[in-house]
Structures are given as structure tokens and as C-alpha cells.
Amino acid sequence: MRNMTGGEAVVDALKANGVETLYAIPGIQLDHLFNALYGAQNWLTIVNARHEQGVAYMALGHAQSTGEPGVYVCVPGPGFLNTTAALATAYAVRAPVLALIGQIASTAIGVGGGELHELPDQTAMVKGLTRWSGIARTPEEIPALMETAFAKLKAGIAPVAVELPADVLLAAAELPAARAAVAAPPRAPIAHAVTRAAALLAQAKAPLIFVGSGAYGGEPALARLAEHLEAPVVAHLQGRGVLPSTHPLAVGFAEGQRLWAEADVVLAVGTRFHEARRNWGERAGMRVIRVDTDPAQFARGTPPEIAIEADAPLTLAALVEVVEAGPAKTDPTRIGRADAIAALKAEIAEAFATRLAPQMAYVRALREVLPAEARIVADYTQIGYVSTGAFDVAAPRLLLTPGYQGTLGFAYATALGAKSANPEVPVVALCGDGGFLFTGNELATAVQHGIGAIGVVFVDGAYGNVRRMQEDLYGGKVVATGLTNPDFVRYAESFGAKARRAEGPEAFAQALRWAMEQTGPTLIEVPVSKFPSPWDLLEP
């Protein structure tokens, strides 16, 4: 026990839980937290940004790219509200983000007196955007709240938040030293459920596997199971890389739609499984097995025949042991399925290459230039869209997207967080000219802190995807989609970053090589014209 302020107790908890980078913007309600942070700079890197959305997106990029907690700090009221798009994105992708959110004085909460930065019910807003949250009413509550927050993150319950009233950060008390949070052991599957699922998969003529981010950590078992069953593995957004894209059984959504039509048994592991159910429909006779730690998933859509509420890696390992121990495949309809899958993959690859040739030229340049371990952050822009379906991904956490939240403009600031957490590998943000300026001001942060992320801005002078829809689907009713842009090269250079303009895919590849040779932040401006629609291949 030692006498500590509430602010010192928060910092003590960060240190105990191995946090080495904090993304933060100070403000009056946080003064006593930052007073404590002042003395922590020998072990803690504090990255201050130019906008609250910047620190929250950086924490998101840190969390998505590593699987470790990304922590941000913001003042209450408008400061917190500025972070909500990033927090909602963390919710969508279950990124382990911890939001430390300031609050007005505890005695003023709920009074409605018009305190500086007061919201009618900030706590309710925080609760609605997180999977767990707490508020400290006294300094004595801080150690337990912080320990619980980190324990939740380790258990995959994310994002989380702790609200910190200004007077609680100032008050002092005799407090215990912070402890590193310990998550409960992952839940193992019930043996009987595994046996039933294995039997169903073993007798399937055309099994199909879907994976999402819940399957992270189960890569070796998944590969063994898919290979034994000759079952294609469909990954969408967060699931990319759980089975490497170059694996013969790894397929995207375009192939998945075709395979869905013949699938008799579907295994969905750690995924919401939403797009396939909604867009393609669950056929009569299709038998579905679902594995998830969240039992609420089983009630969405038609209930699965077998629901396994358990850790996905443990379940995959148990499944493959039972399946491999069973009788060898003898069903003649299963023979040669690998050849059919290879032919389908080749057909879809050709469709991408021909129908989306302009986008694919840039995607190929990315893959040819970047090392396998590079991180790509795909914003809602054409090259980002097509990358989510056609960029080869060797492992999880290498392709970062906003998931179902579809958060336009998230990529550049998110890439800064990913780069600060992975300084040894290239990190590339794929942005359009519309989305980039949502967080392009964070070039100042990149220069100040020496964060060498590579920003790419594809410039067509419009919110291009919406404009194409207005032109092609709505009879040319073009409205509110045109943009006036800066010279992005001069814009980046005005902050002190290095920048180039690249005309076409070949020049883009050369610019990427140049950017990878630099030590600080870089930006590449790429003028482009109207692209063909990718959606019938990406979201059939």
C-alpha cells in the first residue's frame, strides 16, 4: 500500500499491464492524470495528436495490428465524442482498445449544471460503444477497475473504457500496487459437441468453412482440418490471413458464393457469418456448425444444428484430432474436389484481372513491392476495397479494415498507430482524396513523433464510389460528391513529411520503393480516373 492520487493509480496500472505507448490529448479534467504521466516518460511513450479522433484511431491501429491493448486518453464531452467513430470501429472489429475517458467532477455528474464539457449522460454513451465500461467514483476504485479492464481485453471482450472524473484523479488514498490482469483460461469445447461436429464434417460431400477474427491463433489446426476435409475456407475482411491467401483452399467471397450453392455442411468459426446468411440465404438441407465465444451469435439467423460456445483455437485443435483419427475418405464424390476448387480460384482471379484491371494494377504493385509482413490499412476507397478481396495476405493482422462499420477516413491515423506498434515493418495506408483529409492533419503527429507510415492518396476529385453510383444507378443525379483538393505533395511537405506524385501503377511501384527507403513519414499522391464497380466480385 502507498499513498497515491487517482491519476498515479491509473499510471501504475498501465505500467503493471505492460503498456508502453499511450495515445493522448490533455485537457483540464485530465490535469492530474498528466501530472502523473510526466514522471512516467522514462518507460512510457506518449503520442499526442492533433485531434481526438487521431488518438483513438492510433490506439485502434496499435490494437488491430498486434492483438495487444491500444490505449487512448481524451477529455470528456466533445473530446470523447470526437473519438466515437474510432471506438465504434473497434467495437465492430473487436479490437482490444482501452479508452480512458475524462469526466466532470463526480459530484456534478447528472446534475445538468452546464459544467465545462458536460454531456447529458456520457456514461450511457460510453456503455453503448463498448463491451465493458466502468466509472471511478473514488480513487480506491481505480485499481480494480483498471485490472478488470485489462482482464476483459485479454479475454477478447473489447473494446472497454474507464471514465475518470477530474476530482477522483486529484484525490489521494492509500492504494495497493497495481497488478497485471490475468484473464480466465479460454473456454474449452464440450467433448460431445466436438464429436458430433466432427462426424457431421467427416460425412459431408461438400464441406465449407468460414472464418473470422475469432479464429486468430487457430491457424495450424485450421489448415490441417481444411486439408483433411478438402474444405475451402472463406474469409471476409477480418478473417483474411487465418489461412494464407496463397493456400489452395483459401477463397474469397466471390468463390464462396459459388461454393455455397453446393455446400452441405458449413463450419463457421469466430465469425458473425452475417454476409453469407443475409446475401445468399441458408438453404433447406444445409447443416451449419458454429463456433464462437459469444452465444448471441447463435441466435442470429437460423439457429445452427450444432453450436459450440468455446474458444475457436481450442475447438479447431479438438476437431482436427477427432476428424483425423476417423476413417479415411472413401466417398468418390470427394475425389478431385481440390482440382475443382483450383479451377474456380483461377476463374475468379481472371475476373478480377479483367473486370477490375485498373484497380488490380495497383494491387499487384503493392504485393510485388511490399514484404509479406507489411501491414496494409484499407480505407473506403477503390484500391482499398479491391485489396480486401485480392491482396494476398500471409497471416492475420496484416490487412486492417474497419469491418462492418465501414468507417470512411479511418486509415491514415490508424496506420500511424500500427506503425508505432510495428516500427520494423512497412505500414501503408490506402486512402482516397475524400477519406484522407478526415485525418490528414495527423501528418503533423507523424512528423513530430517520427512515425514512418506510408500514406497513399488516390485522387479523383470526388467521393468516387458514391459518384459512380449516382451516375450509373440513379440516372446521373450527381450531387454533393465533388471535391476541391490541395496539392497533396505540397500539403505533406508543409508538415515536414517527404512526398511524391506517381502517375500510373509503374510509377506507384517506384514511389513505394522510394518510400520504404525513407526513415520518416511519407506520402504518395496518385491521380486516378473513374474505376469500374468492384461490388459484384467483393460482395456478391
Image (tube, rainbow, N blue to C red):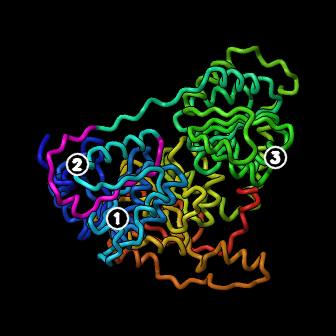
Quarter residue 286 falls in: top right
What x and y, as percent, mark residue 28?
Answer: 23, 70
What x and y, as percent, mark residue 455?
Answer: 46, 64
Secondary structure type for disc 1 = helix
Secondary structure type for disc 3 = helix
Residue shown at the point (29%, 64%) measured from the top left: 48
Q: Amino acid at mark 3?
A: Arg
Residue shown at the point (81%, 31%) measured from the top left: 337
Instruction: Identify whether 104 is placed above or below 301.
Output: below
Range of magenta residues = 156-179
User: Could you say which disc has been placed on residue 258 in the image?
Assistant: 3
**Membership of 164 in magenta stretch:** yes
Q: Earlier in the sequence, mark 1 or mark 2?
A: 2
* Left or right of 67 in this view: 474: right
Q: Nearer the viewer, residue 146 or 218?
A: 146
Between circles 1 and 2, the one closer to the viewer is 2
The quadrant in which the N terminus is found is: top left
> Which residue position is annotated with label 1?
446
User: Could you say which disc has been placed on residue 140 in the image?
Assistant: 2
Within-10-Å neighbours for mark 2: few <14, some 14–19, many 20+: many
What x and y, as percent, mark residue 310?
Answer: 57, 32
